[in-house]
Amino acid sequence: MPGPLHPSSTINPGSVISSHVEQSGPILPLSPSTSDSPYPLYRDRLLKDGLFVNGQDNHWRVACGPFSLSTEEAKFFEALGQHLLVFYQALNRLYLESLKGLQPAWVHEYLDIGKPEDLLALARMNRFKNQLPGVIRPDLIPTNAGMALTELDSVPGGIGLTASLSRMYAQQGFPVWPQSDGLVQGFSRMLRGVLHGQPPRVAIVVSDEAEAYRAEMQWVVTQLRQEGWEAYCGHPRDIRFTEEGLFIHHEGQEQSLSVIYRFYELFDLKNIPKGELIAYSAKKGRIVVTPPYKPWMEEKLALALFHHPMLEKFWEHELKSDTYDCLRAIIPETWILDPRPLPPSAVIPGLRHGNRAVSDWQWLGEATQKERQYVIKVSGFSDQAWGSRGVSIGHDMSQVQWKEVVSQALDQFETSPSILQTFHKGRLVVVEYYDSHSGDVVSMEGRARLSPYYFVDEGQARLGGVLATVCPKDKKIIHGMRDAVMAPCSIMASHPSS
């Protein structure tokens, strides 16, 4: 049973990114001198793949090699995907049973907040009853106490980025784990699993909101063509509707489609050209759209529902003991910021101010910096709910700012709920990257976010790859910023003790 993981105490001299460091000591560079730095080769490769833009200097830092995972961590990631798939299945069942009155009505009421009725009507159609996202990507923070799963993303960016980096480092002789082409092959298998006998024709449809990811998805399309797909990357306006099905305009011709990979958020549907026609075609069974139109599968407050004591019996029944124990160990305590008053005898379950139970949120805005070891996040269905937007860390801002964030989150509950989550500080790691001007190796202490990509095929969630994002140690929010180092992962080589 994968439980909390404890940090390794060694630095792997065969890799230039160590998974842990709390001790002093030399950091070994990739090459003996900077004169033979491979950075120009890496830069040119990233430019060719469209992940860097020529003339721009605001991209992330290029790692000297993959991020090292311990054998224990690798086993954890291999097992985690199936646990999360079972959780997704249970969450979907919880929502549908809530609609039928078999589970508390407040479950679907929470998950439906802010959603338009036409979207909910489409999502609840019986033909989509058992459909789930085909890609599952959690974000995990390695801490000194173990792993902390802070988010689940079913429309994740980074597939093309991680796949390109994996192949790039593998071609330079690094042992990328689990394999250098795992993401492309996993993505292809996932798409084939939803074809149901239709020809392998897919369009990855990228919205304006997701424009920053278009280049990497175009790279994915190029790889899918080598896997036997008729694959296209386009804008929603490139889609053409007919009574027979959907087509995409590509290089002056109309190409018929079997599958659309939806790389746009459901909150943005009103701004998606042809969005209603794509949804109508899915409704009529003329096209498969994945991830499915199920907004309840894209809410962070699902993590709060997992911890809710009134749902404990449901989770224990639906999840096997190893899955339940794993998720209890890694999902931080999470609450829905619901401003509605409680009865005098009720308290907010599991939340304490000092040693006292609390029954409202008023104390939260007045909490001292030491007491503000919390994160507030917009739950979903909002342009503030993806990336680092809508994320506020209590002890990283003034009390005035924090009080305003708390007040705003409570005020917006009826249209866009937020969650409160305990903050978990990442353990220190050492990363080495190439200076973009000189090509020299530079060492940096930072904190990591590990994002494994799982692809669902035949009822199994298989690991395709893991993206490590390391930010400077003074940054509280870990994301793909300019100062971040990003790399795929490898398994740390074992060394005999001296």
Image: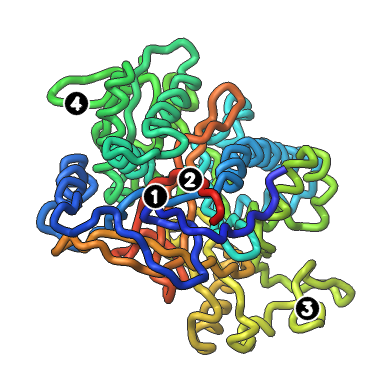
Could you tell which of marks 3 and 1 lies nearer the N-terminus? Answer: 1
Label for residue 250? 4
Q: How far apart are marks 1 and 4 (CA)?
A: 46 Å
Could you tell which of marks 3 and 4 lies nearer the N-terminus? Answer: 4
Work out whether residue 57 or residue 62 is closer to the camera in this orientation and state it: 62
Which residue is tagged 2?
A: 493
Label for residue 14? 1
- As shown in the figure, which amino acid type bears the numbered disc 2? Ala
Is the N terminus in the top left, top right, bottom left or bottom right quadrant?
A: top right
Residue at image coords 46%, 50%: 68
**Numbered disc total:** 4
Circles 1 and 2, Cβ within 8 Å, touching? The answer is: yes
| For residue 470, side relative to residue 371 (left or right) | left
Label for residue 358? 3
Circles 3 and 1, Cβ within 8 Å, touching? The answer is: no
The local secondary structure at tag 2 comes to: loop
| For residue 318, side relative to residue 276 (left or right) | right
Q: Which x, y percent locates residue 349? A: 79, 67
Residue that extends furthest to the left in the rendered view of this protein: 55
Q: Mark 1, residues whose alpha carbon is within 10 Å: few (<14), some, or many (≥20)?
A: some
Foreground mark, 3 or 1? 1
| For residue 375, side relative to residue 46 (left or right) | right
- As shown in the figure, which amino acid type bears the numbered disc 4? His
Work out whether residue 301 or residue 246 is closer to the camera in this orientation and state it: 301
Q: Can the viewer see residue 285?
A: no
Could you tell which of marks 3 and 2 lies nearer the N-terminus? Answer: 3
| For residue 355, side relative to residue 431 (left or right) | right
Q: Which x, y percent locates residue 482? A: 29, 64
- The quarter of the picture where residue 96 lies is top right
